[in-house]
Amino acid sequence: MEPAARNAGICPAKIGEILQKYSRRKDALVAILHDVQKEAGYLSEEALTEIASGLDVPVSRVYGVATFYTLFATKPKGEHIIRVCQDAPCHVLGAKAVIEALEKELGIPMGGTTSDGKFTLEYTSCLGVCGVAPAMMINEAVYGNLTPERIPLILKEYK
């Protein structure tokens, strides 16, 4: 999906379809949020309000869940999400230098999105690959044994 389309939001009818898929069950909130984000690219304020209305729960509950989990986004993100592990093994084994290389190569700080909407750079907790620290994840692909020198080569695959 193109970045503009990913971040264009989602129509109420599509949210209604997703709610129906889960029989409007309140206990399916995380799955519903996941499906809406997959469709729209992020969880807009309008989408969260529509979900809350469709489940007959307070917007604060839906927003609380959407902001608690780090893999949910409440603002538009890039086509490729780069998540850099910030936990101890990665930190000790050189994550800071990798982050500096990413920021330099992309021209954005951590938490930022490139002006072309191609990349978003953010921290994450453990990726579960401590044996190959430092590590990062781009979309669903995990990269380990990172060095600043490898960053341009890895990003080239996504440009």
Image (cartoon, rainbow, N blue to C red):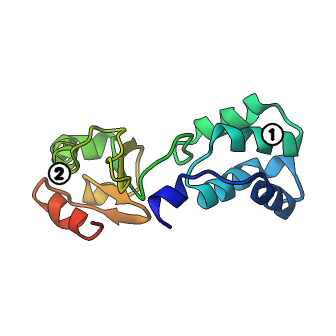
Q: Secondary structure at mark 1?
A: helix
User: Relative to the observer, which residue lies in front, 88 or 26?
Assistant: 26
Q: Quadrant of residue 143?
A: bottom left
Between the residue at mark 2 and the residue at mark 1, the CA separation in whole angstroms equals: 40 Å
Residue 85, relative to residue 65: is it above or below? below
**Residue under numbered circle 2:** 105
Q: Which residue type carries mark 1?
A: Ala
Q: Position of residue 96 (x, y in %)?
A: 19, 40
User: Relative to the observer, which residue lies in front, 27 or 121?
Assistant: 121
Q: What residue is shown at x 62% (from left), y 42% (from top)?
A: 44
Q: What residue is shown at x 62% (from left), y 51% (from top)?
A: 9
Q: Quick check: 106 left or right of 80?
A: left
Residue 133, relative to residue 107: is it above or below? below
Visible residue check, residue 129: no
Q: What residue is shown at x 80% (from left), y 39% (from top)?
A: 52
Residue 60, relative to residue 121: is it above or below? above
Q: Which residue type carries mark 2?
A: Glu
